[in-house]
Image (cartoon, rainbow, N blue to C red):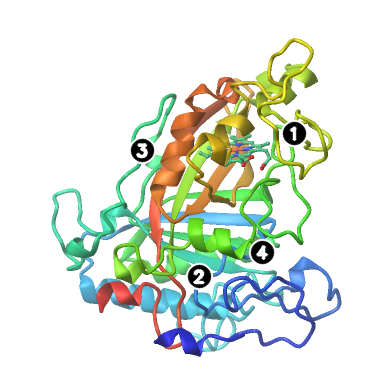
Amino acid sequence: SRRGLFGLLGAGAAGAVVGAAAGAGVAVAVTGGADASGPAASVYPFFGEHQAGIVTPAQDRLHFAAFDVAETLDREGLIALLTEWTDAAARLSQGLEVAEGGAVGGSDYAPPADTGEALGLPASGLTITFGFGPGLFADAEGADRFGIATRRPALLEPLPRFQGDALVPEISGGDLCIQACADDPQVAVHAIRNLSRIAFGRASLRWSQLGFGRTSSTSTTQATPRNLFGFKDGTANVKAEETATVDEQIWVNASDQPAWLEGGSYLVARRIRMIIENWDRVQLGEQEQLVGRSKGEGAPLSGGTEFTEPDFEKTGATDAPLIGTDAHVRLAHPTSNGGARMLRRGYNFVDGNDSLGRLDAGLFFLSFQRSPQQFIDVQRNLARDGLNEYLKHVGSAIFAVPGGVAEGEFVGQALFD
Ligand code: HEM
């Protein structure tokens, strides 16, 4: 097995280990430089049992990109692309230029290998996570250009239509995806820009999304951030330290199919527009009822503090449950969904404004789960969510995220074995 190769590979900079080691060498941050305690100094190993960027403590910034493969691409071309992407991603996540010789070296007669805008910047906790969309396994006409149609995970289907969906095809789907997370937006954008450039002629950007301000915690070492509704988001998220839950709910394991996806996960992306001008006219008490938690502390309305388990049975003076029947946390809670959980890793976005002067703002929801069904069950249950009046799902995509990469391999290599 290749598993024995994994250690703390790639943790090159000198300094103290500050992150939580969840999942063999994935979420280990090594600090160095002037601000040894700051997130900008974090370097995460690219190689490991699982891809980085999942249980890694959520960074502050996101650039997410979905690609369509070119009609002319064949199996060898796809393998070459994944190999070049892997090499570049391994270097970028260590704070190196995309290739040796990078932005300044090489010939005066050719453009530099690296575009240069991250020169001199630290790795800033950059993680690069790759995923494969349903369309990679057979194109719209059903042609199997890459010889992988029979290896498509049966669960990797476009998501079903959900009540209230207002999906825009141009910002949905994709054959391949790359999630780049970092604590510096310049670093995340540099990664997507250079990986898109490498793909030139083989895969083209279908849609992409910038995110600022993580809307989730994925480690108990992190404080809970807030989403654009002003509420703490990520309180009850699956955390890296809950290793038994992560194994049971997030990673595809040996008892699942197909075998090549072992150690991987399924990634759901939803661009959820928030109608914040309307939200901002809602009374505080009503906002809290819709969520099921207090706005300041993030405590469940059944009482206690932020991390107190909600008590959905508890009633108030009127015999009505303190956490209402259409409150988001009740409907999303595992007790309402056959125990299903997910690792949420979304970001806030504001992409200017529409022609009516309303901010084009919301939550770019990202979740990782062992089966897409976990997301589907929760999202179906959220059809009754009182928050929906202030939400519009406009983009949607699903990807199979291969397991981790060992040095000398390319991402998803087992799919082609
Ligand atoms: C919990 C907001 C969309 C699944 C929460 C919490 C907030 C929140 C404030 C409570 C704090 C926490 O535990 O993280 C939002 C907003 C959304 C949104 C503003 C849309 C813009 C979604 C979607 C899903 C989802 C689309 C999945 C289909 C969950 C889950 C929990 C949660 C599983 C934890 C429930 C628990 O175990 O207590 N959300 N959410 N959310 N949300 Fe959302």
Give how far apart the Cα atoms at labels 3 and 4 are.
37 Å
Residue 30 found in image quarter: bottom right
Give how far apart the Cα atoms at labels 3 and 1 are.
37 Å
Give how far apart the Cα atoms at labels 1 and 4 are.
22 Å
Residue extending furthest toward the top: 318
Q: Position of residue 17 (x, y in %)?
A: 75, 79
Q: Residue at x 46, y 74 (%)?
A: 404
For disc 3, the marked residue is: 169
Q: Earlier in the sequence, mark 3 or mark 1?
A: 3
Q: Position of residue 376 (x, y in %)?
A: 42, 40
Q: Residues within 10 Å of mark 4 (few under 14, many from 20)?
A: some
* Amino acid identity at mark 3: Pro
Q: Earlier in the sequence, mark 3 or mark 4?
A: 3
Give how far apart the Cα atoms at labels 2 and 3 are.
28 Å
For disc 1, the marked residue is: 300
Q: Position of residue 80 (x, y in %)?
A: 32, 78
Tell me the SS state at disc 2. Answer: loop
* Amino acid identity at mark 2: Gln
Q: Earlier in the sequence, mark 1 or mark 4?
A: 4
Residue 320 is marked as: none
Q: Earlier in the sequence, mark 2 or mark 3?
A: 2
Residue 51 is marked as: 2
Front disc: 3 or 4: 4
Quadrant hosting ligand 1: top right
Front disc: 3 or 1: 1
Front disc: 4 or 2: 4
Q: Residues within 10 Å of mark 1 (few under 14, many from 20)?
A: many
Residue 370 found in image quarter: bottom left
Between 143 and 186, the one lying in front of the other is 143
